[in-house]
């Protein structure tokens, strides 16, 4: 069975939350697993509005320490304490985040009823942060004003499905089935060989989601996000603010589209919009001049991979 793999956008704005938009936060669901990517200040309310169960989140990934990407985290951890959460939680983020959390809760004398782990991220290449039987989460470096990482969620192959007709036509020992499902040919004691390609369906293509929160235009990103099914890339500005984008280490919609094109991703999801834009259609139009399969992220929308 192919697990669901989808992204729910809870917030997609930069700097000041205006025009009904909220600070960055998104939930990636892979099967029964819920991952939170960044946690802007209204994350809990947004999750409630869009019926995302925050109690199911097991791993939180923070891209960098600008407030619009993590000021919702202290509130979320507090709510977990009040809600008597007992399941473990792991936070992945840059150096300093564990200090910030510890200091906050030391002064509020809060005790966590759940195990809370912290894993420091590093902006020095592709780093594996989390691995399950069906997917991996990597961090990769982004170029911004602070140490910043993007995240790549990559599907892994599960067990292969057997072709039922072949099982009915031939007697296949259980040990062979176990081996074939794992993608390995099997040879029985009489020397009879059972081939994977004969007895199992071909594997579906593996899906991947790349998240680039805040970054200056950086073609080097290509090596990390190549062929992603869905790329979320910040597009804080439009080309008329090209200089401002460079000074603040952000990207324009056109630059995001150029990264999508050179990385040969299937779809580009634009986000992290500046508060100066009330209407976002012009950003989409700008991106589409370079990369046709671009869409504007919408809060509350779910994007399936
Ligand atoms: Zn930032």
Image (spheres, grey):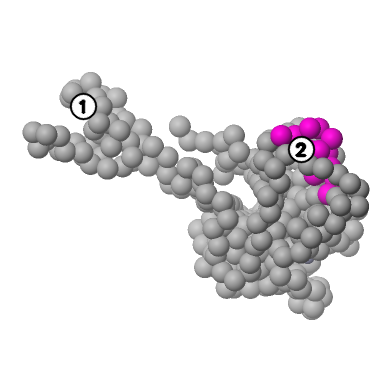
Query: Which of the labelled discs sits on residue 251, or is there none?
Result: none
Identify which residue is drawn at 60% across, 60% down: 139
Q: In the rendering, at what x and y percent does residue 274 appear?
A: 83, 62
- When the figure is inspected, residue 122 is found, relative to residue 58, above or below; the finding is below
Residue neighbourhood size for the residue with mark 2, other residues' Cα within 10 Å, grouped as few (<14), some (14–19), many (≥20): some
The answer to whether one can see residue 144 in this image is: yes
- When the figure is inspected, residue 45 is found, relative to residue 285, above or below; the finding is above
Magenta range? 74-86
Q: Secondary structure at mark 2?
A: loop
Q: In the rendering, at what x and y percent does residue 5 appear?
A: 57, 41
Report whether 227 appears left or right of 124: left
Q: Considering the image in quadrants, where does the N terminus appear?
A: top left
- When the figure is inspected, residue 223 is found, relative to residue 300, above or below; the finding is below
- When the figure is inspected, residue 80 is found, relative to residue 137, above or below; the finding is above
- Residue in the foreground of this view, choosing between 100 and 225: 100
Q: In the rendering, at what x and y percent does residue 32 appear?
A: 59, 34
- Residue in the foreground of this view, choosing between 150 and 100: 100
| Residue highlighted by disc 1 | 172
């Amino acid at each position: 069975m192919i697990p669901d793999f989808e992204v729910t956008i809870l917030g997609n704005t930069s700097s000041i939350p205006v025009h009904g938009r909220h600070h960055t936060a998104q939930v990636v669901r892979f099967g029964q697993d819920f991952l939170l990517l960044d946690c802007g200040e209204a994350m809990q309310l947004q999750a409630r509005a869009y019926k995302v169960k925050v109690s199911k989140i097991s791993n939180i990934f923070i891209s960098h320490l600008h407030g619009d990407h993590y000021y919702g985290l202290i509130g979320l951890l507090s709510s977990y304490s009040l809600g008597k959460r007992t399941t473990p939680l792991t936070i992945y983020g840059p150096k300093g985040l564990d200090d910030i959390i510890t200091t906050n809760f030391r002064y509020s004398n809060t005790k966590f009823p759940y195990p809370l782990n912290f894993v420091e991220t590093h902006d020095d290449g592709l780093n594996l942060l989390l691995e399950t039987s069906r997917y991996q989460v990597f961090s990769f470096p982004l170029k911004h004003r602070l140490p910043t990482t993007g995240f790549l969620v990559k599907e892994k192959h599960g067990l292969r499905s057997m072709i039922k007709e072949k099982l009915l036509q031939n007697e296949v020992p259980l040990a062979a089935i176990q081996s074939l499902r794992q993608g390995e040919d099997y040879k029985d004691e009489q020397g009879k060989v059972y081939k994977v390609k004969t007895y199992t369906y071909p594997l579906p293509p593996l899906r991947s989601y790349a998240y680039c929160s805040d970054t200056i235009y950086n073609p080097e990103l290509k090596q990390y996000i190549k062929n992603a099914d869905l790329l979320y890339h910040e597009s804080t500005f439009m080309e008329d603010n090209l200089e401002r984008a460079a000074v603040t280490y952000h990207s324009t919609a056109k630059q995001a589209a150029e990264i999508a094109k050179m990385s040969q991703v299937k779809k580009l999801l634009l986000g992290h919009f500046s508060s100066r834009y009330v209407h976002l259609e012009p950003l989409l139009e700008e991106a589409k001049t370079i990369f046709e399969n671009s869409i504007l992220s919408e809060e509350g929308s779910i994007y399936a991979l």
